[in-house]
Image (spheres, rainbow, N blue to C red):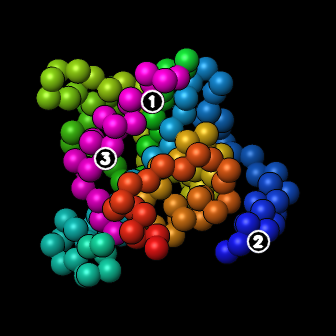
Amino acid sequence: FDAAFIERLQAKFDANHYVPSQCLYSDQYLDIAIHIRRGDVWESFQAGDQRWEEKIRFMSESYYVDLLQRLRSFSYSSSKPIRFHIFSDGQSTDFPQFTFVNEREAYLTLDSDERIENIQFHLSQNSLDALYHLIKAPVLVPSKSSFSFLAVLLGKSRVFYDDAIYAFYQ
């Protein structure tokens, strides 16, 4: 995909004028969207019968806990507080390290008894809304999935990924 092709895809997406059921992002926060692939990969992982193709796509919850700790460092260089948005086909029970305040809001207690707060979970929501919000996120952290890859292509977000995610997309 060259830059001109990607720009044409982005223009086609924007021309649809899709309106999600709710607006998630605000100028008051540095909003960071994180896609955590669960759904089919998680079911296979829990059943213990992972095929090789699914093993390479699965990222553990501890991976994301570490990621949130690293991303929290952005708050030191931003004038806005960080708010994390986690998009997943999973359920709250699939994220035992997080403490859910209600069905959508959670926090994470670290080993040092510090907390990472302002974590909003968007679980099993309408796929078009989820894709829209991943595309429109100010900061996007994709997972190892074509759904995330589409958001990276269609969005104009600042995209962050580490070596594990980068290797998947190559």
Q: Find disc 2 in the rendering and name its residue.
A: 5
Choose mark 2 or mark 3, whichever is in front.
2
Choose mark 1 or mark 3, whichever is in front.
1
- Label at residue 74: 1
The local secondary structure at tag 1 comes to helix
Q: Earlier in the sequence, mark 1 or mark 2?
A: 2
- Label at residue 64: 3
The local secondary structure at tag 2 comes to helix
- Which class describes the residues within 10 Å of circle 1: few (<14), some (14-19), or many (20+)? some
- Residue shown at 82%/60% (left/top)? 11
Whether 130 is drawn above or below 154: the answer is: above
Rendered location of residue 156, percent (x, y): 68, 50
Whether 76 is drawn above or below 62: the answer is: above
Q: Main secondary structure of the magenta part?
A: helix
Name the quadrant containing residue 164: bottom left
Identity, as a three-letter code, of the amino acid under mark 3 = Tyr
The local secondary structure at tag 3 comes to helix
Reply yes or no: does residue 75 show up in magenta.
yes
Reply yes or no: does residue 10 show up in magenta.
no
Mark 1 and mark 3 in contact? Answer it, CB < 8 Å.
Answer: no
- Give left or right: position of 100 versus 130: left
